[in-house]
Amino acid sequence: MNEKSAETLEFPKILEQLARYTSFSGSKMLALNLKPVPDLGIARELQHETSEARELLVAKANLTMGGIFDVRADALSCQRGFVLEGYILLNIRSTLRRASILRRTLGRLSGQYPLLSALAERLEECEGLQDEIGRVLDETAVVKDTASARLAVIRRDIRIAFDRLQTKIANIATSSSNAHYLQEPIVTQRNGRYVIPLKAEFKGRIPGVVHDQSSSGATLFIEPLTTVELNNQYRELQLAEENEIRRILAELCDMVAHEAERIVTTVDGLSYIDLVLARAKYAEAIGANAPTLVEFSSSPPLPNHPGSTIHLIQARHPLLGEHVVPIDVELDPETYVLVITGPNTGGKTVALKTIGLMILMSQCGLHLPTAEGSRLTIFEDVYADIGDEQSIEQSLSTFSSHMTNIIHILGHANPRSLVILDEVGAGTDPTEGSALARALLLHLLEHGITSLVTTHHPELKVFSYNNPGVRNASVEFNLETLTPTYRLIIGLPGRSNALAIATRLGLPTPIIETARAMVATEELKVDDLLDELQRTRDETRFILERAQKHEADTRATQHELMLRLEAIEEERHNVLREAQQQANAELDDLRREIRRLRRQLEAAGQPLEAIRSLQTEVTDIRTEDFIGIPEPMIEDTPDDNTTPQYRLGEFVWVTSLKSEGQITEVASDEVEVMIGRLRIRAKFSEIEKMTGKERKQAGKRAKLATEYEPSPTIAPRTASPGLELDLRGSRVEEAVTRVEAYIDAAYLSGLPFVRIIHGKGTGALRNAIRNLLTQNPLVSKHGAGSDKEGGTGVTIVYLVPQN
């Protein structure tokens, strides 16, 4: 990349902004030295890395790069025999620990973030070194007592020696016999020795070594002779501790030296990962989107067209803050030279810098402050000549400075380059400058170099209409407010606003008319035509914006109405569902209450008239009698298998018992049927409706039965006949009679099952009994007993369960 052009486009300022989002010095240096890459594949991979990092920061908001230090120089110094301080060793451990955490975290998410996971795979954990540093040093970088057995012994001896020394010298300082000689009864330190403050006039009264005196000379700090040996022992132990600590740290540094290359590799990897995360954070901060990077077209429509693509939507200069006016820049397939005209301070230079920065940022893996859908080609280099670069030291005027830069650019640019020229042909005679500008543009056209040019020369407005591949553009100017709008308009050249501005500012009309007369008629016609085109464009844009706003309002209203309709429909379904559930609950409560009352009446042995009266009231109850119960919700799906409806008191045929009965209770999927004096519960599939004639006959039989039966209800339970009936030795006729009576008694007493012992013998008695049981409606099933129960000599009978 051309360094001078990058500085001209203020790209280093972008890198400084990026560096603020890094976490430590290693990644900050990478950010400040970031260079655009000319390779399409690498640039695309950089963009994908940034996109993955943005997704990761959203999913893992607590992900941090804190605790990382650039310890590469420290690690390499250990290879040269240096011994590091404890806090530096802790920095190495902290960096390696963060690398371990990051590698494991991204490793688990390799399916979602493959590029970041691949970067984390390069990190070295050096677990042995981490553990050893943690074993030797505590969190304050102090060597632990447990770092070595010798250090533990030395520190134990230091504590003992210190206690002895303090006790001895404290006794001297607090002794009443010495109080007159001392300034204060305290113990202090001088030159690493413990001393007491002796008054100068009593020198020699307490034998000792003088180590210091006060500034006034009134106090001498002496070490009593009786504590000299204790002080010596204490100091010797301190020196031994320092030597042992240095030996332990030297061993740690030997381990660091052995792992130095892996540590350097890890810090390099962490620096790059932090740079990728910084690119993601910067993109979020400026509201950026990922651009689409494309190749140079292999079949451009014009012979010299390089096949480049520049399509920026709502591009914003990243250094101008939130209130910058975005621009749209699109070079159609037949354009590769754009000529921008317009007044000074209208935004031409900002437009050039914005486009140049977008190119450089995209090739560094940075997302762009544009709308989605922007597309760019990867250029091999970007050359820019912008601004006034006159040099007094080099005796260069503005024109000479521009020419020097342009000559350098023309010597290096090729069809894969982007050339940006500001105010081409300025700073000299307008006629010669215009001719020179046109000649430069012809050279760029013939060599197929993508170029962006700004100018004030009116001749260049016509240049684009006469040369394929060139297109005009202009920056918009508001004549009402006499201020630029900073919008870039592709397709229209800028018009001269001098006469219009002078008129609006109040210059006398005769002077304006004289000036207009001096201007060529063709130029006035061109300005009038451009003015008409501008007004038409403004009207069209206004109509389009109003239509888009109306469409957006319509969509918003439609969406709101749809949400309201869905809410109303959901509320309606909820109300119907709650009402249906409430009705079903009330009906269930009523049925339970009816069953409870019926059992109470039966248990109390009420007379027939009371039971019939209750039965009549129950039969007359209908769901329609409940006010406020809505109709059940009908499903949209048709059901051909409709369930037959049964009513209380209706006569039905029970297919499983081959008997007719009267319904005394109706549930959701079963009914209770009275068969003679017995009640049974049957599923809908086990009963059938009876014809009208059959119902009449059944009714007569039921009426006749009520005249002779004491009660249509279930008879009270009788005493249990026992679980076994022993028929061994009985004849068949006698046994059949006893079995019938026994089964009836067992059912009425509520037994669930019984055993009939008939013996094995010839099998005649067994067969007769089992044939009888098969035809008995009170028997649910029967079968031979197990070996322990008597085998084939016993029949186990299971009775029909009662309600």
Image (cartoon, helix red, strand yellow):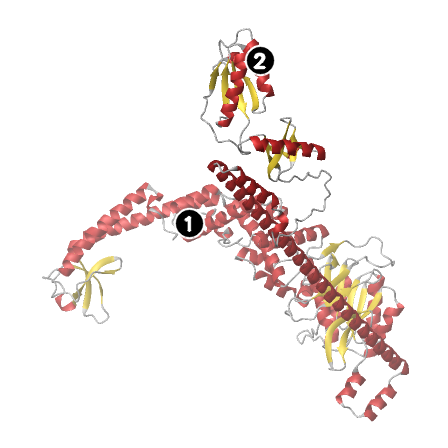
- Is 231 displayed left or right of 775 in the figure? left
Question: How many marks overall?
Answer: 2
**Residue found 66% across the figure and 50% down from its top:** 631
| Residue 774: percent from left, percent from top | 60, 19
Q: Amino acid at mark 1?
A: Val
Label 2 Cα crowd, 10 Å radius (few <14 / some 14-19 / many 20+): some
Q: CA distance from mark 1 to mark 2?
A: 108 Å
- Is 142 displayed left or right of 628 in the figure? left
**Which residue is under mark 1?**
83
* Mark found first going from the N terminus, 1 or 2: 1
Q: Which SS class for mark 1?
A: loop
Asked if residue 680 shows in the view, the reply is no
Q: Which SS class for mark 2?
A: helix
Kindly give the residue lying farthest to the top in the view shown.
Answer: 762
Q: Amino acid at mark 2?
A: Ala
Residue 618's quadrant in the figure?
Answer: top right
**Which of these two is toward me, 246 or 37?**
37
Residue 275's quadrant in the figure?
Answer: bottom right
Residue 389 sits above or below residue 655 on the image: below
| Residue 642: percent from left, percent from top | 70, 39
**Which of these two is toward me, 517 or 32?**
517
**Which residue is under mark 2?**
768
What is the quadrant of the N terminus in the image? bottom right
Kindly give the residue lying farthest to the front in the view shown.
Answer: 707
